Amino acid sequence: MKLSFFSRFKRHFVIFLAVVGPGLITAVADNDAGGVATYTVAAATYGMASQYFVILTTILLAITQEIGARIAIVTGKGLGDLIREHYGARIAVGLFFLYFIVNQGVVLQNVSGLKAAIQVFDQSWKLPPWLPWQLLLLIFCCLLVLMVIKLNYKNLQRIFLVTIIFYGSYVFSAFLAHPNWGQAARESLVYPRLVQLTDLKYWFALIAVLGTTVTAWGQFFINSYVADKGLKPEQLKEARAEVYFGALVTNFLSWMIAVAVTYTLFIHHQAVTDGLTAALAIKPLAGALSSALFATGLFAASCLGLTIVPLATAYVFTEFFGYERTLNANFAQGRTFYVFFIIQIAFGLIVTLFPKVNLFGLTLMADYLNGAMLPVIFYFLIRFSEDTAIMGQYVSRGFSKWFLRVSAVMITVAVLVTFVGKFVL
């Protein structure tokens, strides 16, 4: 007996709710504190033209995340496991070294973002003298570590999903900026008229925006996170829908961040270099509420990124070197996994506690390196997803197969051109 449309929809929706998490969390976590900083600096400098690749970026994020999730669902393994098994320890160690350097830069961005959010709250509501930002930063970092160690996969995922709700503050902040929606759409979706397209620094910024949206760590994380969740091939259709939904949500949020910044800082020619000055600079232009909302979003983004990014590195480390890796293990069972997670946050905390360190000043460079690393990650995604011995009937076909190849070539060319333009010319 054939099911009615409503019955089929209900069944797929129930499965969708069961698989929801990896795609949405990974995609939105790409908009971590470093991502917010990159969108902010780029939009303050180039306005909505900084979002010129937003449609292509959404498609690329959806396709790459879907491929990563599909590989994990079919094989039950993380991308690090597959690279070690098929390419050997030497390639694995070299790739991990590069991956760790890039990720540690992102961790530093997130600790710095948390610091900036706390300082905005301090300046707005005057925290008591016995509660300095250094102590609050230490407390929040310790709470994040305890949360990851003590909670299992299911409970952690619930917290991650709740945290995403606070990103809605950027949507309200954008509306409070009273933007010209038609102009915003034309500059970002049709043709940018307010920037000089021959300026290689502009294209450098676009690569950085791409690199903070389609991240190297995100490609590894969704693969490991899906494998840890234990999804099965029969859930693939719903998992794919969840990944696509996550890509739409994250790029909608990045676009709204750019709107909030463009119609406050960009139109008033106020350049910023970090999250703290951005949130404070918005206050006299769009009001105290907009500034508070921007800081709230930065706080949520920092907490999510400061959890997800070190987890992504810990996943890859344990996969490359054959250790236990699962959020369902206790500390004794997954000691290496959790210790490596803690080390990254501790290092970022130590550096950030020095008051004169401005980590957001390096934000475009860190995310540019993320973008530059993407073709390397794409190579492995292409090789594994098109290998019938690994994927069987689930190999990549059609549009996604060729779009990923073309994107890898275009990003490589863009990285080389912008590198020459920024550091050689």
Image: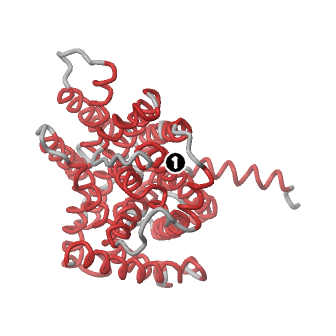
* Front residue of 86 and 23: 23
Q: Is residue 417 above or below residue 65?
A: below
Q: Position of residue 248 (x, y in %)?
A: 57, 56
Q: Position of residue 349 (x, y in %)?
A: 17, 41
Horizontal relation, residue 215 to residue 389: left or right: left
Image quarter (top left, top right, bottom left or bottom right) of the N terminus: bottom right
- Tell me the SS state at disc 1: helix
Q: Residue at x 35, y 64 (%)?
A: 205
The amino acid pointed to by label 1 is Met
The part of the image, by quadrant, that contains residue 111 is top left
Horizontal relation, residue 197 to residue 240: left or right: left
Q: Is residue 387 above or below residue 359?
A: below
The part of the image, by quadrant, that contains residue 238 is bottom right
Q: Is residue 194 visible?
A: yes
Q: Is residue 311 above or below residue 411?
A: above
Q: Position of residue 242 (x, y in %)?
A: 58, 56
Q: How many marks?
A: 1
Residue marked by disc 1 = 256
| Colour scheme of the rendered structure | secondary structure
Q: Residue at x 69, y 50 (%)?
A: 13
Image quarter (top left, top right, bottom left or bottom right) of the C terminus: bottom left
Mark 1: few/some/many CA within 10 Å (<14, 14-19, 20+): many
Q: Is residue 329 visible?
A: no
* Front residue of 10 and 266: 266
* Front residue of 21 and 204: 204
The part of the image, by quadrant, that contains residue 279 is top left
Q: Position of residue 420 (x, y in %)?
A: 25, 79
* Front residue of 318 and 284: 284
